[in-house]
Image (cartoon, grey):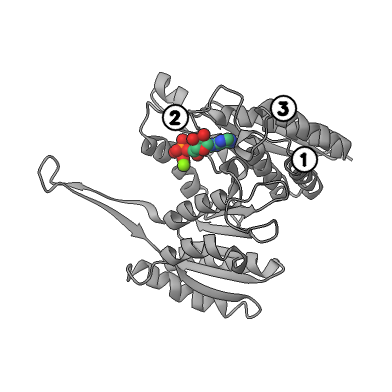
Amino acid sequence: MSNRQHNIAVIAGDGIGIEVTASTLNVLRAVEKKVGGFELKFDELDYGSARYKTKGSYTPEGWLEHLLSFDAIFFGAVGDPEVPDHISLWDLILPMRQKFQQYVNVRPSAILPGIPPRITNAQPGDLDWVLVRENTEGEYAGQGGRTHVGTEWETATEVAVFTRRGVERVMRFAFETAQKRPRKLLTVVSKSNAQRYGLVLWDEVAEIVSKDFPDVKWDKMLVDAMTVRMVTKPKTLDTIVTTNLHGDILSDLAAGVSGSIGIAHSSSLDPTRKSPSLFEPVHGAAFDIMGKNLANPIAAIMSAAEMLRWLGEDKAAEIIERACKTSIEKGQTTGDLGGKLKTDEVTDVVIKLIEGL
Ligand code: ATP
Ligand code: MG
């Protein structure tokens, strides 16, 4: 029987994205050998700020169509101190999310054994969340503009767009996610007291979708109160669903209270599977630690484990996750988690653990 083949587009990007992607590819090769039965074909693409600075664009002509032919996309990080962030976001990241309708962004976070507590009294098991972020509309819809340019009353508008269909599909995904988890608990986050159109629609749709999930216990929170609850009562939360901008902020908070942004991973999914989904660490290009072998590669490696799970390679995914968790539990970590190891040393630890599992 021939091996299952998965074609992966690899966009390492910039800064530490390049370093953690190199680590991840080595780990993937190790698990491929260990588990057997599948083959990963990597196509490494040069999309990123270096390309922008030399060729004038982040990507070549026809890049979105090219990416459509892959089974999944692995992404490192993008960003450069010499290029305004909104350019890389709007030239590279947001077009993929929108064109491929990757309408949910899933960001798990948990306090793992071995991680020093970041908030008072929180122990492993006290914080185990899955944050579901709406990923294609809301405050990132790209609608708006500038008028009266050059005058004192220059006006900029940034319109948050919420469609019933867009809200419904992410809400349904969140209820399904909650239903599959042991506690069957969902918190729907919005700001419907201040935003009386879009976020009132958001809450209304939550009510409607909830009727299909009578076994899911759910509640509504305003985003401001939610930040306090995340820090003071982490155990009362499990699955969380929120809008694009609020999700961006709350997921950094989740990474902060659970451990380090160096282990926070994410998946941008098209649940219909018509287009490739994208897997990436939550962190950015982090130029402050670039080229120093200091970056924690675990966030990227765990993102790749989620990618394998999405591709149906559950066993390989589990082996990678177990190896990452063991390395953390043993304190074999980079500086952000209090350890003394370098990027390549953590990578070697994970690979050795995979080989020994
Ligand atoms: P972006 O604009 O894409 O969010 P950023 O440069 O503002 O990027 P990050 O790159 O996410 O922010 O980094 C924030 C801080 O966290 C950096 O100062 C960096 O030192 C630290 N950091 C980020 N990723 C890692 C990592 N993998 N390992 C260790 N530290 C990290
Ligand atoms: Mg950031």
Circle 1: residue type: Lys
Q: Nearer the viewer, mark 1 or mark 3?
A: 1
Q: Earlier in the sequence, mark 1 or mark 2?
A: 2
Name the residue nearer the viewer: 280 or 40: 280
Which dot, 1 or 2, sits closer to the camera?
1
- According to the picture, the residue beneath numbered tag 3 turns out to be 345
Residue 286 seen by the camera: yes
State whether residue 70 appears in this view: no
Label 3: how many Cα within 10 Å (few below 14, some 14–19, many 20+)? some
- Amino acid carrying mark 3 in the image: Glu
Residue 183 x/y as whole percent:
68, 70
Vertical side of 185 occupied by 268: above or below: above
Could you tell which of marks 1 and 3 lies nearer the N-terminus? 1
In-front residue for pair 260/134? 260
Q: Nearer the viewer, residue 172 or 258?
A: 258
Specify which label sits upstream in the sequence, 3 or 2.
2
Q: Are marks 1 and 3 in contact (CB under 8 Å)?
A: no
Outermost top residue: 54
Residue 18 location, x and y as percent?
Answer: 58, 27
Q: Which mark is residue 58?
A: 2
Q: Is residue 28 above or below residue 152?
A: above
Q: Circle 3 — which element? A: helix
Distance from Cα at disc 1 to Cα at disc 3? 14 Å
Q: Quadrant of the N terminus?
A: top right
The residues bearing labels 1 and 2 have C-alpha atoms spaced at a distance of 40 Å
Look at label 2 and name its amino acid.
Tyr
Say the numbered circle drawn on residue 330: 1
Q: Residue 25, located in which quarter of the rendered image?
A: top right
Percent position (x, y) of residue 17? Answer: 56, 31
